[in-house]
Image (spheres, helix red, strand yellow):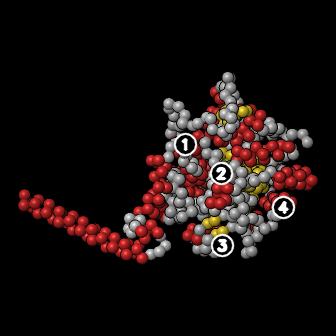
Amino acid sequence: MTETLFELAAYSVLTLMGLLALLALLLGAWVIYAWVVDVRQTQHTVRRNFPVIGRFRYLFEHLGEFFRQYFFAMDREEMPFNRADRTWVYRAAKQESTTIAFGSTRRLDVPGTVIFVNSPFPALKQDFASSGPLTIGEHCRSPYTTSSLVNISGMSFGALSSVAVTALSRGAAMAGSWMNTGEGGLSPYHLEGGCDLVFQIGTAKYGVRDERGMLDDTKLKAIAEHSQVRMFEIKLSQGAKPGKGGILPATKVNEEIARIRHIPLHEASISPNGHPEIRSVDDLLDMIGHVRAVTGKPVGFKVVLGDIGWIRDLCRAIQLRGKQSAPDFITLDGAEGGTGAAPQSLMDYMGLPLNQSLPMLVDTLDEFHLRPRIRVIASGKLITPDRVAWALCVGADFVVSARGFMFALGCIQALQCNKNTCPTGITTHNKHLQSGLVPSDKAVRVQHFVESLVQEVGVIAHSCGVDEPRGLSRRHARIVQPDGEARCMTDIYQPVSFHPGNDLMPED
């Protein structure tokens, strides 16, 4: 017995030594090969001067994207979303406690910081109310009435995986929210969950385009016949890349995506940077009227503002044509809005952030007495209760988010959205990576995220002394100024003449 055990031990040691020797041989061969290649190549200076060792620079640079957020960045430092905000979404989506201890890590002296005005007489629990229904496009053949406050912003099937879209669709239905299809067309996965849908018409008109890439009324009408499609949104621009169309890498254009979008297989899908038939505010109103006439449903547009002048021109054109010609809603995206792929020159430098453009838009529409005829939908990093409450204070009717829902699905901000290598299966068509995302589980997290977000916005509203979120107004928020003073929002911007919770049209 002892001899047998000794023989087994000796055999194991010899096997291990053999494997280590083989590994050493392979490693040595690779080092020699890499050394020869690195010394002879002329493209990379570091590798030429430091053969083999220089290669680790690229490895560490890549790994840094993943490890910075865990080991080096403070809770409130990381961009585009810091750890504190991401953690709140993760906990909300898992229905875990979002309470914290020992004080906030948020600085209150930074200019632009929003501080809400608590009431000495907060709303009592028995007076709490949920947000009431609002109607969009009341003059359409099929207006849309919803009580939803937080909804899913445009993310295309193609940019997102089929399992991610399925989970979002199911979760939105469970939460009573709508889901924007994004510009990639209507897929079976959008319909599967049974939620209300907003069909986005991008510059390439995917899903409703003819052979020349122009709007096809027959296809448009067919989309409108789906009872789940409640509204249509004409996308003029989006947060991360105003003036640039959608970018879907060729590696993501599989047979199903090509069929839904009506585009060539395995070719990069690059949308035009604008609608060729919309070159003025009058063209925009003509397009809105046309889509509304064909579909019978509310029609609006999505835009990033760089200046308010053209919105004033739009309002004047509406005055000349009559209020029936107005868009039923405007989705305003801030420059901080996100996307899977965009030129850095646009992502970093183009367009106004939402905290500047939203007050400008609301005030201009109020000036021309166009609310509530035109509903305002706010978008741009609105993933936490304070940001949603701020948007409601400014005058938004609804809030939409894209990346907040990606976090609810399990996104870890790996910054791989445009590479088809997303480790969480959200933005990849790699079946192995998709297998980690189980729609039935993630749909529940989407539902919990919406419910927790709305609930905590309600907590802020109640502390301010109003009984429901849409009761918030500009007098309920202060903004820290460069001199350190927190000034009331009504002192910075004019008070709104229309309140989202009141459907009475102001007098002309």
Residue contact between numbered discs 3 and 1, judged by CB atoms under 8 Å: no
Q: Is residue 23 left or right of residue 381?
A: left
Residue under numbered circle 1? 76
Of 184 and 100, nearer the camera is 100
Q: Earlier in the sequence, mark 1 or mark 4?
A: 1
**Residue kind at label 1, given as amino acid type:** Arg
Residue under numbered circle 4? 280
Q: Which residue is at 63% across, 38% downward? A: 110
Q: Would you call the spot at circle 3 few (<14 residues within 10 Å), some (14-19), or many (20 or more)?
A: many
Q: Quadrant of residue 35?
A: bottom left
Q: Which residue is at 73% across, 46% downward? A: 356
Q: Would you call the spot at circle 1 few (<14 residues within 10 Å), some (14-19), or many (20 or more)?
A: some
Q: Which residue is at 54% across, 36% downward? A: 105
Q: Position of residue 124 (x, y in %)?
A: 65, 25
The C terminus lies in which quarter of the figure? top right
Q: Tell us which disc is closer to us: 3 or 1.
A: 1
Residue 336, numbered label: 2
Measure the C-alpha gap from mark 1 to mark 4.
42 Å
Q: Position of residue 152 (x, y in %)?
A: 64, 51
Mark 1 element type: loop
Measure the C-alpha gap from mark 4 to mark 2.
25 Å
Q: Earlier in the sequence, mark 3 or mark 2?
A: 3
Residue contact between numbered discs 4 and 2, judged by CB atoms under 8 Å: no
**Residue kind at label 4, given as amino acid type:** Ser
Residue under numbered circle 3? 263
**Residue kind at label 3, given as amino acid type:** Ile
**Residue kind at label 2, given as amino acid type:** Glu
